[in-house]
Image: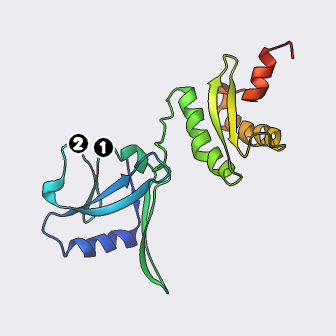
Amino acid sequence: MNINISETAQAHFVKLLSQQAEGTSIRVFVVNPGTASAECGVSYCPADAVEADDIELKYEHFSAYIDADSKPFLEEAEIDFTTDQMGSQLTLKAPNAKLRKVADDAPLFDRVDYFLKAEVNPQLAGHGGECTLMDITEDGYAVLQFGGGCNGCAQIDVTVKDGIERQLIEIMGDEIKGVRDMTEHQRGEHSYY
């Protein structure tokens, strides 16, 4: 576990901490983790506020603490401190704050579901749509349910085949053979249409 804190941000924290009580560290956390309104934050962490299950990340001149619950949401997080004409600004990026990162050895359904929520839905959201993983068939097809603006959209086949299917096969390798739309999947099972 590591949070990438840039050198300028580390220097900024050292300066701030020098004005605090001896033994004060910083705490990095996520508010509303796993939701669309998730926000990454930083606060002072006095020595007596460190919990037993906190994770300590040691940097050259200070430590940062993370509570165990925030850990999966802070994977690949970055903290930077930039100065421009508008002044100085601390920026926090936590790509997994809204969605907990799934382990590489997690069940296939969970990994495909994570990919759809993290990569595909943000793209579809621009068009008012979304997709949900309903099932993975025994022969390796991911069955997706499209909603919102995707419902009945003429571009859906292109989105499914060219976009989602290609990316999934690339990432999941031999585990996924393709993608099916839920409506197409249901039609296929009722041969009397």
Residue 102 versus residue 62: which sits nearer the camera?
102
Secondary structure state at the residue bearing disc 2: loop
Residue 93 versus residue 6: which sits nearer the camera?
93
Rate crowding at label 2 as few (under 14), some (14 to 19) or many (20 or more) other CA atoms within 10 Å: few
Residue at 36% in and 46% down: 71
Picture quarter with the C terminus: top right
Residue at 56% in and 33% down: 111
Seen as rendered, the residue at the extreme top is: 192
- Mark 1 = which residue? 68
Which disc is residue 119 wearing?
Answer: none
Query: Counting residues from the N terminus, which is met first, the one under dot 2 or under dot 1?
Result: 2
Count of number-bearing discs = 2
Q: Is residue 162 above or below residue 77?
A: above
Indicate the quadrant where residue 7 lies: bottom left
- Residue 86: x and y in percent read 48, 84
Amino acid, disc 2: Asp
Indicate the quadrant where residue 173 lies: top right
Seen as rendered, the residue at the extreme right is: 193
Residue at 46% in and 55% down: 94
Q: Is residue 170 above or below residue 86?
A: above
- Residue 12: x and y in percent read 33, 74
- Mark 2 = which residue? 53
**Residue 115 appears anywhere in the view:** yes
Q: Is residue 137 above or below residue 132?
A: above
- Residue 75: x and y in percent read 43, 48
Seen as rendered, the residue at the extreme bottom is: 85
Secondary structure state at the residue bearing disc 1: loop
Residue 82 versus residue 148: which sits nearer the camera?
148
Indicate the quadrant where residue 163 lies: top right
Rate crowding at label 1 as few (under 14), some (14 to 19) or many (20 or more) other CA atoms within 10 Å: some
Residues marked 2 and 1 touching at CB (< 8 Å): yes
